[in-house]
Amino acid sequence: MPCESPKTLLHRLGLRPKKALGQHFLLHPHQARRIVAALHLTGEDTVVEIGAGLGALTSWLALAARRVIALERDPELARFLKEELLVEPPGVEVICQDVLKFDFPGAARDAGRPLSVVGNLPYQITSPLLFTLIRESAAISQAVLMMQQEVGTRLLASPGPKDYGILSVLGQYYFRVTRLFALSPGNFYPPPQVDSVVLRLVPETPAPAALDQALLHRLVKTAFGHRRKTLNNTLVSGAAAFGLTPEAMRVLLAQLGIDLRRRGETLSVAEFVEISNQVARLRGVM
Ligand code: SAM
């Protein structure tokens, strides 16, 4: 655990926080411990840490897991982690890499089990990272992630006009998402301009499950492509993209009791799955 404050440490290293990399370092060890404790690690687990920074979480993780893969995109911080901070803890591997290019399935194969994932996320990549975790959910056993409040709200949102969108539907389809706690900007150096929230994501086998996941993704994207448009103007007009005629899509939605005047933002996750499965079945018999 670094005993100097992030500000002192960066100053000693001749570095400044890089805004473009979303560098806001945790100030208080007890917050780091809280995040690591929320992971429920066993001594058998391999953890992937996203954006290890100055190592605020890394050493705590090393105490709790078998192996820590600490990803850090900034070469100067990765060098610091390798040379100075992490000479002691065994089982920590620092990799200077963009997490969006990390091979989660390969690492899970090497570990012989799904991975735990943790990170105080660089906010500019939160959405693409969440979509990466959705895509790779089979390689993950749990994730505890700090993100900007606004994205956390979207991930947790129920159907409605404000925060509910593609991220909410797909995030909730693949994961049980729980809000753990919030952190104000004063917990970081330098303070970000937004509040942060820590969420826990645990992959779940959804019920009902989608027969064709790629189809579900396309359907959700189409329904939210134009938020103000009704299903008649998104799914029915765009039925050809799903291999159906507009009439067949209209009948399918009517059979499911879904009013064409509704908008995509009113459909629950289960309704999206039902529509997608009916489309898949219909295509199977056509
Ligand atoms: N974990 C540290 C902490 O809590 O104090 C640092 C968190 S800071 C919000 C985010 C870190 O992610 C920075 O160290 C930044 O350099 C790193 N980072 C930014 N983009 C990244 C990417 N695409 N892949 C891996 N690390 C990245």
Image: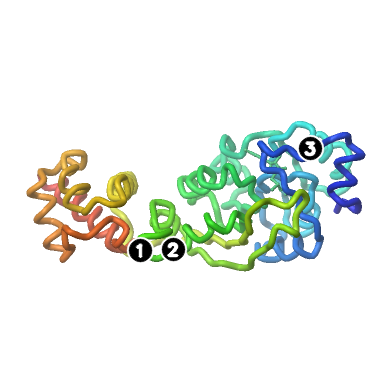
Horizontally, residue 129 falls left or right of residue 249, namely right
The spot of residue 79 in percent (x, y) is 81, 34
Name the kind of residue labelled 1 in the image.
Gly
> Looking at the rendering, which quadrant does residue 40 occupy?
bottom right
Q: Is mark 3 within 8 Å of ligand 1?
A: yes
Residue 77's disc number: 3
| Pointer 2 local density, CA inside 10 Å: few below 14, some 14–19, many at least 20 | some
Q: Nearer the viewer, residue 148 or 207?
A: 148
Of marks 2 and 3, which one's residue comes earlier in the chain? 3
> Looking at the rendering, which quadrant does residue 158 occupy?
bottom left
Way the structure is coloured: rainbow
Of marks 3 and 1, which one's residue comes earlier in the chain? 3
The spot of residue 141 in percent (x, y) is 56, 57
Task: Say which element carries label 3.
Answer: helix
**Residue position marked by numbered label 2 in the rendering:** 157
Instruction: Give the residue at x 51% y 46%.
Output: 127
| Pointer 3 local density, CA inside 10 Å: few below 14, some 14–19, many at least 20 | many
User: How far apart in space, not on screen, are marks 1 and 2 (Cα)?
Assistant: 8 Å
**Residue position marked by numbered label 1 in the rendering:** 160
Task: Say which element carries label 2.
Answer: loop
